[in-house]
Amino acid sequence: MSTRNTSLNRSLHIAPFPSRRLNRWAEVIWRVAGSVDVRTKILGMVLALTALLGLAVTLQVRAVMTRVFAEELENRGISVASDLASRSIDPILLNDTYTLHQLLRETVSNHPDALYAFVTDDHGQVLAHTFGDAGFPAGLLDSQILDAAAANTHGDIRHWVYASNEGIVHEMIAPIMGGSAGLVRLGLTETRLQTVVNTVTGQMILTTLLVALAGIIAAMILTWLLTRPILDLVATTKEVGRGDMQARAPHWADDEIGTLADAFNQMVSDLDASQRSVTDKEQARFE
């Protein structure tokens, strides 16, 4: 008999995995789960599932928003750079650098994501830019930039992405008159869009925490409804064990636990009646 019980216990504690390591981990998890009460189990499962689901949804939404915003920024940059290239033709042909400067400044100021804009002639010399007193960064004239941008083109417009102290920058390079009059280069930063993504992410994390809190409260109420009748049944069992045959388990509800309480009460009643019958027979025999 003991051998049979031992094999039964082992079958409950060891998961049927092909790997010994998985079996050991399953046994550890089983022991840990078995060492805590039902309330802790339910609360832990609710909290874990809520956190996992909230994290998965947040990461998915963040990834989708980042991709969509990047595509929208790229399309807008292509449109603005193309328009800027066409509007720069007359100032370049007339050698009107003042109007060209004004055109670049207005373009950057009217687009919140625009970081800079500048125009070069067909020899790569800067004709106008929006960097102001900070001076023009000579690194942007590196010929390798144009070579790298050539690998990512949208029609006549080239696009390259780089990291700077202003964050991720998308630069659009548009030819003026097919490149014979120079190039327009427009830099757009992801800073504003990343701020929006981070704000939405924070709001979703806050929502997840609120949902987790509501789930914990609901789980506490549920565990109270489940464990309270069981605890009362345990207390009644102890009273009967001490000899109080009048003790009865309360009938909380018409569910499985209520049925169990009724069956236990019926068992105690039958046991009490049996003991009374035995006692009456013993008394009658001695009389």
Image (cartoon, grey):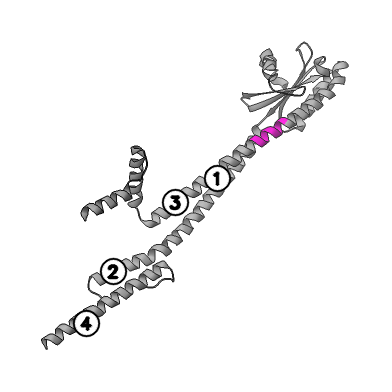
Between discs 2 and 3, the one toward the N terminus: 3
- Which segment did they paint magenta? 67-74
Q: Is residue 272 visible?
A: yes
Alpha carbon distance from label 3 to label 1: 19 Å
In this picture, is 100 found above or below 283?
above
Residue 220: percent from left, percent from top: 44, 59
Left or right of 254? Residue 56 is right
Q: Amino acid at mark 1?
A: Ile
Alpha carbon distance from label 4 to label 2: 22 Å
Instruction: Identify the main secondary structure in magenta.
Output: helix
Q: Which residue is mark 2?
A: 237
Q: Amino acid at mark 4?
A: Ser
Q: Which residue is mark 1?
A: 205
Q: Nearer the viewer, residue 100 or 77?
A: 77
Between discs 3 and 1, the one toward the N terminus: 3
Crowd band around label 4 with a 10 angstrom C-alpha radius: few (<14), some (14–19), many (20+):
few
Alpha carbon distance from label 2 to label 3: 30 Å
Q: Mark 3 falls on what kind of element?
A: helix
In this picture, is 20 found above or below 240?
above
Q: Nearer the viewer, residue 6 or 214?
A: 6
Q: Tell me what residue is drawn at x 70 percent, y 32 percent.
A: 73
Q: Amino acid at mark 2?
A: Thr
Q: Which residue is mark 3?
A: 45
Residue 48: percent from left, percent from top: 46, 48
Task: Indicate the quadrant where residue 56 lies.
Answer: top right
Q: Which residue is mark 4?
A: 277
